[in-house]
Amino acid sequence: MSSAQETGETIELDAVVVSSGFLGGIAIGPERGYEPDGVGSVAAKVDLPARQVPFSVDQATAELMEDRGETTVYEAFENFAGAHTQSTNSDTGSNVSRGFFSRGFDLGSGGTVLYNGHRVYGVGSNYRSTASLAGVELLKGPAAIYYGASEPGGVINYNFKKPLSERRYEVGIRGDTEGSYGAFVDAGGPFTPDDDRWRYRFVAEYDRQDDWRDYVEETPDTLFGSVEFEATTELSSRLTYEYLDVDGVPQRYDTIRFPGDTLFPVPDDFFAGNSSNFVDIRQHTILWENEWSPSEAFGANTYVLYQFNEQSHETTRIGGRGGGAPDGTGALPRTVHVGESEDRSFAAGADLSGKVETGSLTHQWLLGYAYSHLDSDGTVVQISTTGSAAVPLRRLRPTAIDPFAPDNGPYPYGDDLFDLLDREGVARGGPFERTDHNVYAQDIVTLPWQTTKLMGGVGYAYSQQIDGPALGTDTSAELSDGFVSPRLAIIQDIAPAASIYGSYAESFLPQLIVNDYETYEVLDDPQIGRQFEVGYKHEIMSGAALFSVAAFQIRKENIARRLVPEDEFNTNSVLDGVYRSRGVEVGLTGQITDRWSAYMGYALLDTEVEESDDPLLLGQAIPYVAKHNFALWNKVNLYGDIAGPIGRIDLGFGVNHYSDARDPTGFERDAYTLVDLALFAEKQLENGVLLKGAVRVENLFDEEYFDQRSFGSSVTFGDPRRVTFRLSTIF
C-alpha cells in the first residue's frame, strides 16, 4: 500500500503495486477514488473526521472529475448540488469567466479563492483546466473567520496534485464528436529509487475544445510542477508552480429577449461575433508550503503564494446601448468590447495548532494569521452599432449582422479601440488595490465522555482598499475598516459512525461604492452574512463514503442595488437589500459498496428578497437561483477486474436537474434535466502496464434548454448531445 498527499493530509492510496516485470514497484491504481477526505482542513483548519465537520463541504476528487468528464472547473462546480455558474455583463463570453453561486449567493464578488486551503485574492473564477488539480472543494456557508472578506454562500478551494512517493506515469489523449482533441502527461514519484524523501509531480496538457457553434473554441494549456522534500517524518517542504495559457474565441450571447419574453428567432448555432475576436489569459501561480509537526501538542504550517494574471480580449455581442431591436432589414445591432488587465496577488500565512489535555478535557487549538494583497489594473472600451457614443468612438461602430446570412469577417477597428484604453472619458476601469490582514483563534473541546465536541472561534480582519482614481477625475476612493467574525458549533456522536451538529458562522464583504466623485458620496457599509446550520452525517464502508443531511438559513444584509444610469459612465447605487436563503441539502458521496461509487446530491433552496425598494425584487426569489437542484453520478462495476482476462468494465450514469429560475426583470428560465452515460474499461497487461479507456455521451437525450447564463436580455443555448472519448496508459 502506498501513500500520497492529495488534500494536504497523508492518505492511504487504493493502489495496485506491480512487483514483477521491467516496471516493478509502480503504483498504477486510482489515487483517491470518490472518497471524501481531508474536508476538515478547509472547513475547520484542523484534522477532523468528515462526519464530525460541523459545516457542509462538497468535494470532487480527480477520479470523480475524470469519470464525469469534467475538464474545466466550471463543469466540476456545476455538478455540486445547490451550486451553479452564472455569467455577468463583465463576462468576456463563452467559457472564459463566470461567477460561482452557492446557496443562492455569488462567491466571486469578494475575489476570494483558495489554493490548497490558502486564501488569495485573485481571479479564481477564470476559465481553467482540472489537469493539475487533485480535487475541487466547495465549503458552503460563511468562513470569514479564516478567510477574511468573502460571500456567505461559501468559498471554493483548488487542491493541487501532490508529489508521489511511488513512481507513476500516465500519458493519454482525448477528443469528441465536435472535433475537440487533447493530450496530457501526468508523472510523479521519487527522484531516486532508493530515497523517497525527494519526490515530484509533473503535469502537462494541451487541449483544444471546439464548440458546436462555428468559430467558438477554447485552447487551454497547462504546465504544472511540484517538488517536495521530507527532511524528517516531522518536517516537510513543498514548492509548486502552475502556468495556465488560455486562448479562445468566445460567444457572448446566442440571441436576445424582447419585452414580453419574446426571443428573436435565430439559428441555434448562430455566431454573433467577428472572426478577429479573441480572449488571451496567462496566469502564473507559485506556492511554497512548509509543515512541521514535532509533537501532537504542537505543529506549524506556513505558506507563501504569488499569482500573476494578465488578460486581453476583443469580443462581439448582439445588442447595444441603443437596444437590441433589429433594423429594417432584420439585421441585429452589435457591441464590440476590448480590454486589457493585469492582476498581481501576494499572500502569506501561518497556522499553529495542536492537541492538548487539561484535566478531563481535550483541546484541538488553532492560532493563525493570513495576509493578502491584490494590485489590479485594467481598462475596457466598447462601441455599439446604435446608441450614443463618445466622439472618438463613433467612426468605429460595428456593423449589424444578419443571423440568417451572417458575415463574420474581422472587425476592422480593433487596434483603434485598443489605442483608446487609456483615454479619459472613453475607457472604463482603472487601478485597484486591496490589502487584508486576518488573525484567528479557535478551540475544539472534547468533553470527558468523548462523544461531544464544542467549537468556538473568532477572527479579526483589517481591510484596506484603494479604488481609482476614477477616469476623468483625480480622486481615489479609499476604505479602511476592521471586522470581527465569530464561529460556534456543537458536534455530538450518536453512534460510532454517525454525528449530529449545529453551527453558526458569519461573513463580511467590504464595499466601496462612489456615487459622485465631486461630492464624494461613498457607500462603505459592508455586506454581512449570518448562517445557522444543523446537520447529520453518517460514515459508510468504514469512512469510504459519507451520507449527510443539512438544513440552514443565511441572511445577507446591505446589498447594493444599482439605479438607472445617469449616463454611459456614471451610475448610482443604494444599499437597500436583504436577501434570505434557507434550505435543505442531502448528499451521499464515495465508495458505497465494493462495486458501486457515487456522488448524489439534492438541494432545496427557498430564497427571498426580504428588503428592497425595488418592487420588482421585493418578495421575489433571489434572481438566478433554482429552487430544486438534483445532481447524481453513479459508477458501477459490471464485470471483472483489471488483472482478469478481459479486464474491468464499469458503467457510469449521471443526471443533473435544475428547476426553473427567474432574473430581476421576471424572465423565467425553464427547468431542464441532463442525462449522461459512460462506459469505462481497464486492462492490466502482463508487464504491468495499465490501459484505460472511456466513452461518454453527454446530454444523452439531446435536451434543448437555456443555459444557466441565460438571463436578462441575453440568452445562451445549452450544449447539445456530444460523445467524448479518453484513452490513457499508466506505467
Image (cartoon, rainbow, N blue to C red):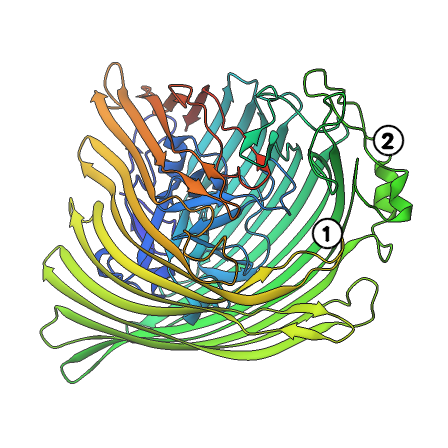
Q: Residue 654 occupies which quadrant of the picture? A: top left
Position of residue 220 measured from the top left corner of the image (x, y, whole percent):
60, 35
Q: Is residue 669 above or below residue 491?
A: above
Q: Nearer the viewer, residue 176 or 427?
A: 427
Residue appearing at x 42%, y 47% in the figure: 625
Q: Nearer the viewer, residue 16 or 672?
A: 672
Give the Cα distance between marks 2 and 1.
22 Å
Position of residue 426 measured from the top left corner of the image (x, y, whole percent):
83, 52
For marks 2 and 1, the one nearer the N-term is 1
The residue that label 1 is drawn on is 341
Crowd class of label 2 (few under 14; some 14 to 19; many from 20; radius 10 Å): few
Residue appearing at x 64%, y 32% in the figure: 251
Determine which of the numbered discs, if any, sits on residue 412 in the image.
Answer: 2
Placement of the N terminus among the 4 image quadrants:
top left
Residue 363 visible? The answer is yes
Residue 164 visible? The answer is no
Q: Amino acid at mark 2?
A: Pro
Position of residue 438 measured from the top left corner of the image (x, y, whole percent):
50, 74
Element type at marker 1?
Answer: strand
Q: Residue 328 occupies which quadrant of the picture? A: top right
Placement of the C terminus among the 4 image quadrants:
top left
Crowd class of label 1 (few under 14; some 14 to 19; many from 20; radius 10 Å): some
Q: Nearer the viewer, residue 201 or 268?
A: 268
Q: Amino acid at mark 1?
A: Ser
